[in-house]
Amino acid sequence: MTKRYDLIVVGAGPAGLTAAKAARECGLEVALLERKTDITNLHRCCGQSLVSMNDYYFGDIFHFNNKGKRMCFPVNRFSLKYDGPSSNIYSWHFYSPDGHIVKLGDAKELKKLGDNGRIAMIHDKEVFFRCLLDEIDKTGVEVFPGINVTDVTKTGENVRVKGGDKNFEATYVIAADGTNSLIAEKMGFNKARDFFCKISSQSFYIRNAKIPELEVALSCPDYVKEIPAFMVIFPWINEDEINAIFLTLDPHLNLDEVTDYFMNKHPIYSKWFKDSEKLRKFTSVESIYSPIREPFSDNVLIVGDAGGTQEVENTGAMISGWRAGNAVATSVIESKVGLKAEGISHYLRWWKETYIDKYSHEDYVKNFTFSYILSGDDLNYLFSLIKEPLAPCFNPYEALNLISQAIQQAAPTIQQERPDILTRLAKMAAPLEEVLTSIRK
């Protein structure tokens, strides 16, 4: 006989773990299903950063309590245990192909403020998984690793979830199964979304790299065989290591070629990696959609990366999961005491106001697609015009806007010296489908 739960959470990432914890602490019977056999194992590319520590992100301002070892979300009034190592990010540097740098934040000045000057924090995600899983085990959530969910169906008042030879049944399901969510696809949520492209990545922990400045994040766009490609470097928890991610949106480009170009052939970056050592490797392929505007149907609630554009970052996933777990708990409790179940509607209102209405998913994707409009020479010229550090920022929805504003201030100079670039910049306003025509085919 299939055991019935109040809630089934599918996916044990930041959103799913946090959702299960929140719902169980409200007294719900919760099952947590995860495809991985070892929930604490990280296998996909991730910068393992927590944004944004100097402004509001998803309606909250993330803070880490160093003494108490807690990740704190004061607006949403919850915290999560993290007793692992960490490092700070004080600035975000964007490099042009020839090495001109646009700095979001003056790292030297911000470091003087200590932790109060950081714009993001690096954490060990595997330690975080372990900490949160320990907390969940103590609450009594039933955890089922090694369950690859293949089907979700509404059966009367309940939802049935099939994984391998096991069946699970609950009043509600929270789908926190990531950016390539099978549940979102199975339940038809993707039919109303625009599909833009896929982003392929591979990353490495690298030892003894000679990065120009520590405690900063670096974004390095360039072109491999005239195709846009990117290297993104994050600090890591070990002082002699970095976390380097190599990625492309173009399926014609091999990731090994991208990695080899940046590490061994690039006239600037290859010097950083001389005598360095690649350690652990990660990979990922993520679908980039427009966000799900109404993430609830047939008692299934889509949360975190599963409903966002590519990803909502670790911070956004935790906030989303926490609010989703409490929303389901509210609806279950309302039903049990004879009230109209309205808890889910509170989550949907929050999702719309905080994510859909506040952030432009097109601006987010343009962090990658500007290289399809501008050439390497264009980027070299534009970045050379921005001399002073811009406002400190590690918010992916705001970064390109800050750079765009700085370029706009230089428009008279550009008009006089390189009017052709202004013509190309105007294409940034075109729909993403047009910008990405070459790779969408």
Image (cartoon, rainbow, N blue to C red):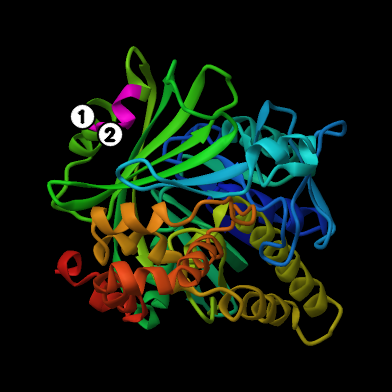
**Which residue type carries mark 2?**
Phe
Position of 254 relative to 399 (above/below):
above
Question: Is residue 2 found inside the magenta-colored segment of the image?
Answer: no
Residue drawn at x 48%, y 58% is: 311
| Nearer to us in this view, 12 or 57 | 57
The x and y percentages for residue 400 are: 48, 63
Which residue bears the numbered disc 2?
262
**Residue 27 seen in render:** yes
From this view, report whether residue 431 is shown above or below residue 115.
below
Q: Which residue is mark 1?
A: 265
Towards the viewer: 250 or 175? 250
Label 2 residue SS = helix
Label pair 1/2, CB-CB below 8 angstroms: yes
What kind of residue is marked 1? Lys
Q: Which residues are magenta?
A: 266-271
The kind of secondary structure element at disc 1 is helix
- Residue at the farthest bottom position: 340
Does residue 258 sit above or below 299 in this rendering? above
Q: Is residue 269 magenta?
A: yes
